[in-house]
Image: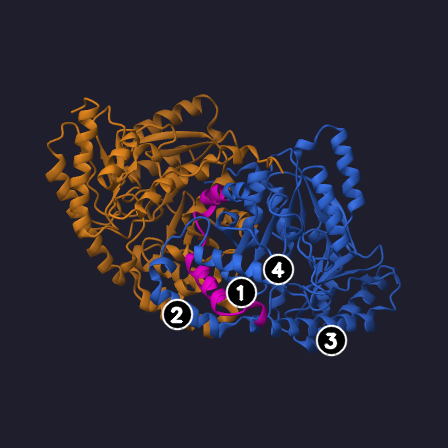
Chain colours: A blue, B orange
Amino acid sequence: MKDYKFSSTALRMKSSIIRELLKEAMNPGMISFGGGVPDPETFPREELAKVADKVIREEYSHSLQYCPTEGDSVLREAYLKYLERAEGITGLNLDNIIVTVGSQSALHLISEILLDEDSIYFVSKPIYLGAASAFALRSLNHEDLELQDDGIDLDRLEKRLAEIEKAGEMDKVKFIYVIPNFHNPAGVSLSLEKRKRLIEIAEKYDLLIIEDDPYGELRYEGEHIPSLFKLAGKERVLMFRTFSKVLSPGMRIGLVVGHENLVRKVTQAKQAADLCSPSLTQRIAGRYLEQYDLRESLKPTIALYKKKMKLMLDELEKDFSDIPGVKWTKPSGGLFIWLCLPEGFNTLEMMEYGKKNGVLFIPGVAFTIDNSCENCMRLSFCLPPEKEIIEGVARLKKTVLEYGKMKGLL
Amino acid sequence: MKDYKFSSTALRMKSSIIRELLKEAMNPGMISFGGGVPDPETFPREELAKVADKVIREEYSHSLQYCPTEGDSVLREAYLKYLERAEGITGLNLDNIIVTVGSQSALHLISEILLDEDSIYFVSKPIYLGAASAFALRSLNHEDLELQDDGIDLDRLEKRLAEIEKAGEMDKVKFIYVIPNFHNPAGVSLSLEKRKRLIEIAEKYDLLIIEDDPYGELRYEGEHIPSLFKLAGKERVLMFRTFSKVLSPGMRIGLVVGHENLVRKVTQAKQAADLCSPSLTQRIAGRYLEQYDLRESLKPTIALYKKKMKLMLDELEKDFSDIPGVKWTKPSGGLFIWLCLPEGFNTLEMMEYGKKNGVLFIPGVAFTIDNSCENCMRLSFCLPPEKEIIEGVARLKKTVLEYGKMKGLL
């Protein structure tokens, strides 16, 4: 067979730049600020092993069998109780929650049930790469909202919505996608004030907000800000949650919480997409949630990441504050710092210098649809040990100086 | 929010008829020949519990962490060795295999990477429902090949291909989808002779064959027939395998084996669809395959299902052979028998009579895209205990007689 006859969608697909870059992270001596993967030492392995053994031996007729497309009811019930305990979200039942294969599959299902080729959707710039790729499979009409220190640019949102309404195209606008807490890649959070204003705008134009919140439980300082879902309710907000950053990404458990009409349509799409998520990992997570206090067990993880984040911020302060025009975000949680160099720097090009110096980061272009943000980079502090954070930031400084001088930028 | 703005694809989605019907199976006293789910007593729970405990405690940095989109390499390597041992398939490496969330997600990914709205694809009639729903998300131009006792109607295939070629539309034909062994729902297998002829036709028109083989390892009598993949090779055939019927459906492990160019494109699509399959279930399955002989451990399962199948066939012979015009398939393996009543019977309508009499089956229309096969039904023998098979067939006979007399058909 000479050529396979791929679809037009398939011909648009490219391998992720992150994926390609991270292969380098395996090289000996390399310090990587690239991946957004949790530190495996934070996984409660003893507890999970115990729970797994029990659910396989004693609950095999559920844990090893097919389960409903909506997900294991033990897990869904336990998660609704968790939402009530942890965030005071009440009034939901099993019709308001569906389990997905990580948040990525939730993004994909949402893209399938909401987007047509001419659909318009609002996203942040920079954007979480997984969302960009899932949405782009269906529609390329993204409207970008610049990320500011307190979240997406709402002036721009209002301006564009007014224009779209004037053009009579409001029917095409499907949703506003936001990561409100400790944004990936930018690290910033949407302030309470802006959350309220965003909800007002969404109500005015009768728009759906998709609230993707993988990092909200990883707050290292400051006060918890109520979720958009808590503030506006299930009619207005569809909320994505995941166990990937708080229990284990390898279990691939995402949760979609929202209005029953939306959850029902996600269920129909999921039926054709994968029939059901793995019963085994769901039952393990469900029993774990029943038997352990997730927030309590997260405390050592939070302490560890907080220490690493502070260290990286301190090292950046020490090594980078003398570079004119450089700036970086100062998150209160999550896994990422977004560092922007002066105009003229191209972090994708700079990668080669970084590799030579033994340090990896993700160039900003990877998080934009229009290949902008080329002077920025994403740094993750969660995986490298403390001494590697110190050494890695020093190598990064060296890389910036080398590249900047070579290009006549410094 | 008054209405959510669903995509045109979403508006076409319906809940599966099987799903709705199977809710009835929970009613006390109901005997169900409906579901195609394995008997949980066949799951090797002791072995799986031991393996799970070990991979969580000792391999947590892989089993609980993200894994490559292509899948856990322990599992992929173990499966390639299994294919070589069990079926003499050689010459493959890790670039030829990707793990999916059950075969359903493989069907969905294939639909995404191969089908455009005007694409043509060949399927059997009746068709496996999951394939129909995944393909229909992208294109409705299915070409149906009637199932005969030895598999799909190849005369029809040749005739239609000649017509399509004459019309200059061969570029639109994307693949021929076949379940060669113990077809769901029809129970029949594609003969060796027809396999060879199918490959010749595919070669003549340079077409891809998708070989979906969930049941091949569940042969109860007769000789193993080589797979299309074994006969024609990776350039011509993309093969789907799964652990759902031979180990545990709840682990949701499907495998796609084929040419590296196709596997690479499936990988790109999977990245946007779910990032990666669960590492935990993959690592468990990989270590299980290394430590146990899957074919050996399947022997009791095969003995159990063989006994149940023979019992159901005997009971059908006893109770149904006096109904003029009735016929049913006599499979050599798998999970399903396809029973067709005389013209005029409508098994969807007959469901109500079945429920009243305490017996469930899946009406034939559920397995067609054009709502045909209305006089047929799918019967599964794998889950009910033997005495329920005897009683259930008797109830089915009673149902057929009642309905037939009421309609003046008998």
Q: Main secondary structure of the magenta part?
A: helix
Marks 2 and 4 sit apart, C-alpha to C-alpha, by 31 Å
Q: Earlier in the sequence, mark 2 or mark 1?
A: 2
Q: Secondary structure at mark 1?
A: loop
| Discs 3 and 2 share one subunit | yes
Q: Earlier in the sequence, mark 3 or mark 2?
A: 2
Residue identified by numbered label 2: A53
Residue A168, image x, y percentages: 72, 28
For disc 1, the neighbor class at 10 Å (few under 14, some 14 to 19, many from 20) is many
Q: Chain of mark 4?
A: A
Residue identified by numbered label 4: A87
| Discs 2 and 4 share one subunit | yes
Q: Amino acid at mark 4?
A: Glu
Residue nearest the viewer, comparing A123 with A190:
A190
Marks 2 and 1 sit apart, C-alpha to C-alpha, by 17 Å
Residue A150, image x, y percentages: 78, 55
Residue nearest the viewer, comparing B89 with A371:
A371
Residue identified by numbered label 3: A390
Q: Amino acid at mark 2?
A: Asp
Q: Is residue B121 above or below residue A338?
A: above
Marks 4 and 3 sit apart, C-alpha to C-alpha, by 36 Å
Q: Earlier in the sequence, mark 3 or mark 1?
A: 1
Q: Is residue A3 visible?
A: no
Q: Earlier in the sequence, mark 2 or mark 4?
A: 2
The magenta stretch spans which residues? Answer: A267-296
Q: Chain of mark 3?
A: A
